[in-house]
Amino acid sequence: MAVKKRAPPAGKKYTVTSSTGAATVVSSDSSRPKMSLPSPSSTRSSNPTLAKLYLLLLSLQFGLQPTLNARYTPKDSNKTVTLVIQESTKVALAAGMLASSMSRKELSSMISRWSLKTFLQHCAVPSLLYSLQNYCLLQAYLHLDPVTFNVLNQTKTLSAALFCYLLMGRRQSGAQLGALLALTASAVMIEGSVDVMSYLSSPSSLPSVRVVDAARLVKGVAPCLGASAISGLAGAVTQRTLQGSAQKNSYLFSLELSAFSTAYLALSLP
């Protein structure tokens, strides 16, 4: 004997959860279930070749940027104007990438959902921090050789771990802490202000501090370390701000950060 399945009352909705965890809302007065489309991130396929290309380009940028900045940025140039041009270029690039990555309908939908309150909430503090970081980096570019700059700049990994712990409570493993300490020690050794080798040969004595060029220390080393510390703080603030919120388009977020930085720097011009 066939058993009839009782249909749900007309006009009511119920939810069916599939094995993948996706919830589908079904209306009893419709012949087909109304399913939400998967998010773009779930349909995006990985491309190892493209990822390797991006890593290669990032490595080239990382190695060449200090040399190019030192060569083509005069020491007597107006640093605020330089940063305004830099951030304006970022705005143009981010806007172009954003426009090319989605259809007109998707772009219009994103613009309609945009709000000034959310923009200020997510971008105001990180933008100010990144503006200060860029100023310190520009100062360090002009007074440090590329190798020393790149090594000292890696201390931002240490600051990122520190501020993620202070602001978000994220602890590091023993191996990670060992790697961070080794990174810091290598930066100190290569920079040359502290004679670590003499301390290793005679552990009973304290490390001797070499006499260094005061201008290099104040105008090069200190700004570079300051920029690294600000980088970690800005990254932790951004992550805490965006954590738990709806997924934000990375091009849009970059555009917002650069736009706010451009406006702030332009207002600070004499």
Image (cartoon, rainbow, N blue to C red):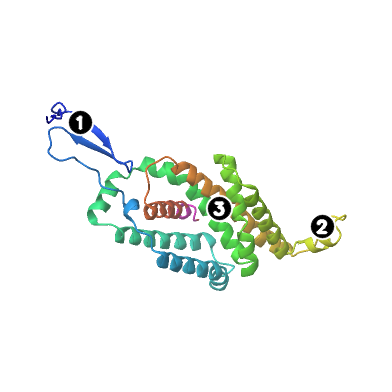
Disc 3 target residue: 231
What's the residue type where badge 2 is placed?
Pro
Quadrant in the picture for residue 73: bottom right
Disc 1 target residue: 13
What's the residue type where badge 1 is placed?
Lys
Q: Earlier along the polypeptide chain: callout 2 or callout 1?
A: 1
How many residues crowd mark 3 within 10 Å: few (<14), some (14–19), many (20+)?
many
Disc 2 target residue: 207
Quadrant occupied by the N terminus: top left
Q: Residue at image x 59%, y 48%?
A: 161
Q: Residue at image x 56%, y 62%?
A: 138
Please, which residue is most extreme toward the top here?
9
Rendering coords of residue 246 (x, y %): 37, 42
In the image, which residues are magenta? 265-269
The rendered magenta stretch, by its main secondary structure, is classed as helix
Kindly report the distance in space between the C-alpha atoms of the residues bearing marks 2 and 3: 29 Å
* For residue 265, above or below residue 168: below
Q: Is residue 142 shown left or right of residue 1?
A: right
**Of 123 and 32, which appears nearest the observer?**
32
Q: Are marks 2 and 3 in contact (CB under 8 Å)?
A: no
- All told, the count of numbered labels is 3
Rendering coords of residue 213 (x, y %): 74, 65
Rendering coords of residue 85 (x, y %): 45, 63
